[in-house]
Image (cartoon, rainbow, N blue to C red):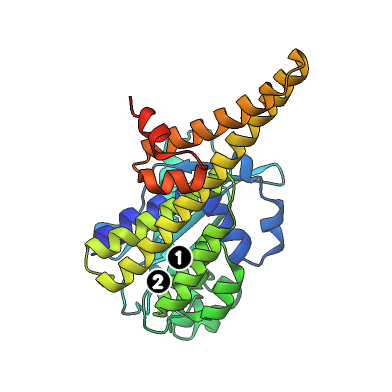
Amino acid sequence: MHEVYDRGYKKLFSNKALFRQLLESFVPLEWVKELDFDHCELLDKTFISKEYEKRESDVIYQVQLRGQTAYIVILIEFQSSVDKFMALRILHYISSFYMRLKDSEAKIDKLPPIFPIMVYSGQAQWTAPTDIAELIEHHDLLGEFALNFRYFKIAENEISAQKLFEMGNVVATLFLGEAHHDRKLLVEALSKLSRKLPSPEDRQLISMLFNFFEQLFYNNKLTEVDWQAFHRVLTDSEMNMFLENMKICDEIAYQKGILAGKQEGKLEGKLEGKLEGKLEMARAMLFKGLSIALIAEVTGLSESEIEQLRH
């Protein structure tokens, strides 16, 4: 099952828009507002040791902050059980990253800042300390020479279902589905996302989210009832977005007809533009495999006119 999460989460957070959503929605630090998300770069590397590669996955971004290069590491912890020594594991990860960076860049003078985020998708409460000082007995004995390190935690199940629902973006909906078992609320959240009729980029993000849930279903993480509910939302969403696009195409064709009518001084131009918009809509719906009866209802064309478009 971990392979599904590994591929699924890495794919989701390898998308720059979702990376930005994660930070802006769940990392309430002032410097996040200063990140240059337009020029962030995803690194195709991993620094997870063999011992832990079945427990977690990682995504690394090189970012620009106040004109300087920095790195943001997202570690996704899949296990339901909580590893008390997560802070040590992440410190080891960061040390490995720095060593590889030093060895690969001969002229390096100083190391860049790295911000580690742990995203926890398990069901148990996260009780492990985020500060390594809490793992070291008598940490204060060494005073200023004591080891200090901490990571930023995002435990999905610590965020209330209602708050995630109200946030209403793709990452929040992902966390809602992962951490809370409220199918009705999740379906409502997915419908809310779909009803926004967002930009093409947003539609792609919604499609990625549905694909993730689909993979969970095929790997027996979701029940058939769950998936049927999600699939109905997806089908309705695709139809709504499809019809909205067709309305836009119809209006464009209609406006072209008006222009042609003005240029030629004929009312027929308007009518031809309106008809052409309906025909284009019908062709696209046929291509989508929709029924002739439904196409006739939406476009106002007769079924015989629609049949002729098949040829």
10 Å crowding of disc 2: few (<14), some (14-19), many (20+): some
Q: Nearer the viewer, residue 210 or 13?
A: 210
Q: Measuring 29% from the left and 57% from the top, which residue is drawn there?
A: 49
Residue 39, horizontal then vertical, whole percent: 61, 39
Q: How many marks?
A: 2
Q: Eyeballing the image, is 109 above or below 122? A: above
Q: Quadrant of residue 5?
A: bottom left
10 Å crowding of disc 1: few (<14), some (14-19), many (20+): many
Element on which disc 2 rests: helix
For the C terminus, give its image quadrant.
top left
Identity, as a three-letter code, of the amino acid under mark 2: Glu
Element on which disc 1 rests: helix
Q: Is residue 78 visible?
A: no
Q: Quadrant of residue 110?
A: top right
User: Is residue 167 found left or right of 292 in the rendered image?
Assistant: right
Q: Which residue is mark 2?
A: 178
User: Is residue 146 found left or right of 51 in the rendered image?
Assistant: right
Quick check: marks 1 and 2 in contact, CB under 8 Å? yes
Q: Nearer the viewer, residue 267 or 150?
A: 267
Q: Which mark is residue 226?
A: none
Q: Measuring 39% from the left and 80% from the top, which residue is drawn there?
A: 181
Q: Which residue is mark 1?
A: 174
Q: Nearer the viewer, residue 197 or 166?
A: 197
